[in-house]
Each structure stands twice: as structure tokens, then as C-alpha cells.
Image (cartoon, rainbow, N blue to C red):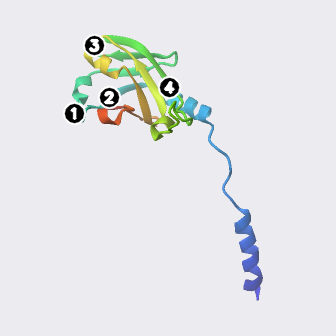
């Protein structure tokens, strides 16, 4: 008899419980990711261009994303300076009315030059993953098969 009364009460309780309708704040999320990027020095753990692993070309370099928007690369022989900016992805359709999954990624733009290696980093990258220990970037042109990953 108790089970008979208990089942409707449990059904009402479960029906009234729902997931929160809160949505993440894209600005706060971008601020959090920016803070993760600027917290320390990075090294390149993977650089692939056209499917060819060229990570070795960045051996001995360390990189710093400074809070003032400067991007600095240091090796035993050279120091290069440039700029960086992390921007929000777009949920709006492009000029042709198409919306692509790539548009939803944050964009990390690096502008640096001075050597062949630095010229290859100078690009607007899709930020696939940003954590306190990893930054995963890729070219928005999938045919280029260009991947850039930073780690600690």
C-alpha cells in the first residue's frame, strides 16, 4: 500500500527536477581561456604542415603569450617579437549564408616574423582546445592539414 502512494510522489519529484537552463557566457569563457594562455611559457609539441611533421624545426624555442598582446619567441640564438589575440568564434552565418562548425571555434591569431619558423606561426588559427597545459590549433583550411600544438 505504501508503494502505491510512494510511486506517484516519486514521479512528481522526478518530473519537477530538470537541468538548469543556464548557458555559458562566451565572454567569460574567452577571458578564462586568455588567462590560461598568458600564465607561463610554452613549447611547440606538434607542428604539422600538409601532413608532414615539422615539430623538430621548433626545437629549442620557448614562447610566451603576454597579457599586453605581445607574443615572444626565444631560443639560444634569437628572440622574436610579434602580437597575438584570442577572439570569439562566430555563430552567425557567413556572407553566403552558411554556418560552419569551424566558425564556432575561437580564433587565435599570431603575427610574428623574422625567420622561416616564425613566418609559419604567423596565422589565424582555429583554437580547438585551450587548457592550462595545452593549446591545440589548426588551420581553418582542412586541406592544408596544418596543426600547431603548444604544451608545457
Instruction: Check disc 4 and report the residue beneath it.
Output: 86
Q: Is residue 100 above or below residue 88?
A: below
Q: Position of residue 38 (x, y in %)?
A: 48, 24
Identity of the residue drawn at 34% across and 36% down: 142
Disc 3 designates what residue? 115
Q: In which quarter of the view is residue 40 placed?
A: top left
Question: Which residue is more in the foreground, 89 or 66?
Answer: 89
Residue indicated by mark 1: 52
Apparent side of residue 92 relative to residue 11 in the rendered image (left or right): left
Q: Earlier in the sequence, mark 1 or mark 4?
A: 1
Q: Which percent across, then down, holds residue 111?
A: 40, 16
Q: Residue furthest front?
A: 96
Closer to the camera, 107 or 101? 101
Label 3: few (<14), some or many (≥20) within 10 Å? few
Q: Position of residue 34 (x, y in %)?
A: 52, 28
Q: Alpha-carbon distance for marks 1 and 4? A: 26 Å
Badge 3 element: loop
Is the residue 68 above or below the residue 19 in the image? above
Q: CA distance from mark 2 to mark 3?
A: 16 Å
Q: Nearer the viewer, mark 1 or mark 3?
A: 1
Q: Residue at x 31, y 35 (%)?
A: 143
Q: Nearer the viewer, mark 1 or mark 2?
A: 1
Of pointers 2 and 3, the one earlier in the residue sequence: 2
Mark 1 near mark 2, Cβ–Cβ under 8 Å? no
The residue labelled by disc 2 is 44
| Residue 145 visible to the viewer | no
Q: Earlier in the sequence, mark 1 or mark 2?
A: 2
For the C terminus, the image quarter is top left
* Relative side of 122 to 51, left or right: right
First reached walking from the N terminus: tag 1 or tag 3 = 1
Amino acid at each position: 500500500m505504501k508503494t502505491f502512494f510512494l510511486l506517484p510522489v516519486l514521479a512528481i519529484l522526478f518530473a519537477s527536477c530538470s537541468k538548469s537552463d543556464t548557458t555559458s557566457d562566451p565572454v567569460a569563457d574567452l577571458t578564462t581561456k586568455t588567462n590560461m594562455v598568458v600564465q607561463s611559457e610554452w613549447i611547440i609539441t606538434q607542428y604539422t604542415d600538409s601532413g608532414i611533421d615539422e615539430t623538430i624545426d621548433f626545437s629549442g624555442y620557448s614562447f610566451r603569450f603576454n597579457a599586453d598582446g605581445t607574443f615572444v619567441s626565444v631560443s639560444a640564438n634569437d628572440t622574436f617579437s610579434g602580437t597575438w589575440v584570442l577572439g570569439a568564434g562566430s555563430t552567425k552565418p557567413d556572407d553566403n549564408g552558411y554556418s560552419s562548425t569551424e566558425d564556432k571555434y575561437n580564433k587565435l591569431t599570431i603575427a610574428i616574423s623574422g625567420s622561416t619558423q616564425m613566418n609559419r606561426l604567423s596565422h589565424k588559427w582555429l583554437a580547438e582546445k585551450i587548457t592550462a597545459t595545452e593549446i591545440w590549433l589548426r588551420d581553418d583550411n582542412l586541406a592544408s592539414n596544418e596543426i600547431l600544438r603548444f604544451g608545457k
